[in-house]
């Protein structure tokens, strides 16, 4: 690996870590806001309630920062490198729960955090760093249609069932949309590099990114509202990296390693990362209530 690639990787990983931190802050703040309605407003009343809630607005600011940092990360490195790093959102969110919400965190959760970070480190060492723009716009067709169909099926499946099941379905749909949005972001940064910001507004990836982003926000807000954060967050954090790796391979020609041996290590370490993340979520407190009592909770 030459020094230029290593420097780009370092910038990308730093930006991805900042993205994970912003995501953890945004999801935590907006979940608190979306579940704090005493009268359980719906429709436009619920929207008006959220617009007045300071934590919901904090979440929006955090999400804006997340988009900026993610764009920079995807500009400098492959999707298969950047997106899995976002799993660390769980670890950083756990720290936020402990320091901000004053929640008691089990040893199992901290151990799973260490395992998640360690296995992710192995994945980053094993995976390739090379990536490039699609050779033709047609390479977007099959992945785009597949993601649209998957989101449709998941949303329909999430209309009924227990709160946990509904949150999981909507969360999975959110993960697919976020992975597709990441692909659009990467393509937009490539367009800016070659044609400038003026060229961006004349090409379809920019508008596809807007549509995908707005849809993703609506679906994510629904996922946060219909059921427990544990269910939606599990789906979002675990499914997003998997879909991103596939989209990176199909659209940008990314590979998880330079040889089959390294690819096997990359796949195994990614699986270990996601398994550890699942254990971490299961060991995380199910609610946002402070361990010091309701009076100490930010809600």
Image (cartoon, rainbow, N blue to C red):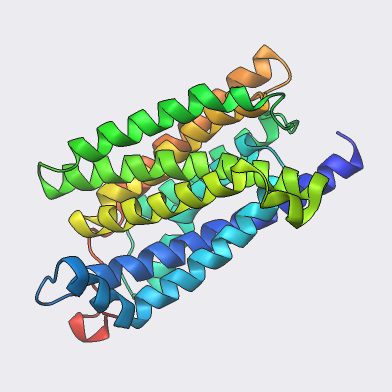
Q: Is residue 101 above or below residue 129?
A: below
The answer to whether residue 143 is visible is yes
Residue located at (37% from left, 48% from top): 280
Which picture quadrant has residue 72?
Answer: bottom right
Quarter in which the N terminus is drawn: top right
Q: Is residue 88 above or below residue 265?
A: below
Residue located at (67% from left, 20% from top): 262
On the image, the x and y values in percent for residue 49 come to 24, 78
The answer to whether residue 249 is visible is no
Q: How many marks?
A: 0
Q: Is residue 134 above or below residue 176?
A: above
Q: Residue furthest right?
A: 3
Q: Residue furthest front?
A: 202
Quarter in which the C terminus is drawn: bottom left
On the image, the x and y values in percent for residue 158 come to 19, 41
Left or right: 177 with respect to 209? Answer: left
On the image, the x and y values in percent for residue 213 come to 47, 52
Front in this rendered view, residue 156 or 196: 196
On the image, the x and y values in percent for residue 283 come to 30, 51
Which picture quadrant has residue 124?
Answer: top right
Q: Is residue 217 above or below residue 181?
A: below
Residue located at (13% from left, 71% from top): 41
Left or right: 272 with respect to 245? Answer: left
């Amino acid at each position: 690996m030459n020094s230029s690639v290593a420097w780009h990787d370092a910038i990308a990983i730093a930006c991805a870590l900042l993205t994970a931190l912003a995501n953890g802050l945004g999801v935590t703040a907006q979940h608190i806001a979306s579940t704090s309605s005493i009268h359980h407003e719906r429709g436009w009343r619920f929207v008006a309630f959220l617009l007045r809630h300071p934590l919901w607005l904090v979440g929006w600011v955090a999400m804006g920062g997340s988009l900026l940092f993610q764009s920079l990360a995807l500009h400098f490195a492959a999707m298969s490198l950047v997106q899995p790093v976002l799993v660390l959102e769980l670890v950083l969110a756990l720290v936020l729960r402990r320091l901000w919400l004053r929640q008691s965190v089990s040893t199992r959760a901290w151990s799973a955090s260490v395992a998640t970070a360690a296995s992710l480190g192995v994945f980053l060492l094993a995976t390739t760093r090379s990536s490039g723009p699609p050779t033709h716009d047609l390479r977007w067709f099959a992945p785009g249609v597949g993601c649209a169909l998957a989101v449709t099926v998941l949303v329909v499946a999430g209309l009924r069932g227990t709160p946990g099941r509904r949150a999981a379905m909507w969360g999975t749909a959110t993960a697919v949309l976020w992975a597709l949005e990441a692909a659009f972001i990467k393509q937009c940064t490539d367009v800016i590099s070659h044609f400038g910001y003026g060229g961006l507004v004349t090409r379809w990836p920019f508008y596809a990114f807007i549509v995908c982003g707005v849809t993703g926000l609506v679906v994510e807000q629904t996922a946060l509202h219909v059921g427990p954060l544990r269910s939606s967050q599990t789906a979002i954090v675990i499914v997003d990296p998997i879909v991103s790796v596939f989209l990176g391979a199909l659209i940008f020609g990314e590979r998880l390693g330079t040889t089959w041996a390294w690819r096997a290590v990359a796949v195994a370490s990614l699986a270990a990362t996601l398994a550890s993340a699942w254990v971490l979520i299961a060991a995380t407190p199910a609610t946002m209530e402070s361990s010091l009592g309701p009076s100490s909770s930010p809600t």
